[in-house]
Image (cartoon, grey):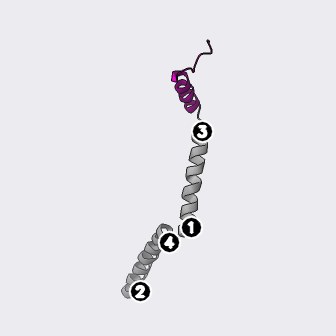
């Protein structure tokens, strides 16, 4: 035999669950304070610069630029 379901309660529960899901999405989206967002962005930029400074390709490009400079690249006098 099937379980008896109160349709009004089922509808309200469904609406409550949908509202809870929307609230959770909004908390994630808008719940971070501006100071924390700014700090996270600055930290991301700092770590990105630190990693870019450690790239081998960056050093090779810089060495090639030095070699192209007048009086640079060779130590012949």
Quadrant occupied by the C terminus = top right
Say whether disc 3 or disc 4 marks the residue closer to the N-terminus.
4
Do the numbered discs 3 and 2 sit on residues whose CB atoms are within 8 Å?
no
Q: Real-space Cα distance between discs 3 and 4?
A: 36 Å
- Helix, strand or loop at label 4? It is helix
Q: Which residue is mark 4?
A: 27
Magenta stretch: give its range: 56-76
Residue 69, percent from left and from top: 52, 24
- Helix, strand or loop at label 2? It is helix
Q: Real-space Cα distance between discs 1 and 3?
A: 27 Å
Q: Residue at x 43, y 73 (%)?
A: 22
Q: Nearer the viewer, mark 3 or mark 4?
A: 3
Q: Real-space Cα distance between discs 2 and 1?
A: 42 Å
Query: Is residue 32 positioned above or below 55 on the image?
Result: below
Q: Residue at x 58, y 35 (%)?
A: 55
- Helix, strand or loop at label 1? It is helix
Q: Which residue is mark 3?
A: 53
């Amino acid at each position: 035999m099937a379980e008896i379901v109160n349709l009004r309660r089922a509808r309200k529960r469904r609406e409550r669950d949908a509202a809870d899901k929307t609230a959770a999405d909004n908390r994630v989206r808008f719940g971070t304070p501006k100071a924390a967002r700014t700090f996270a962005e600055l930290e991301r930029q700092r770590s990105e610069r630190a990693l870019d400074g450690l790239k081998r390709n960056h050093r090779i490009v810089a060495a090639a630029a030095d070699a192209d400079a007048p009086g640079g690249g060779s130590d012949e006098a």
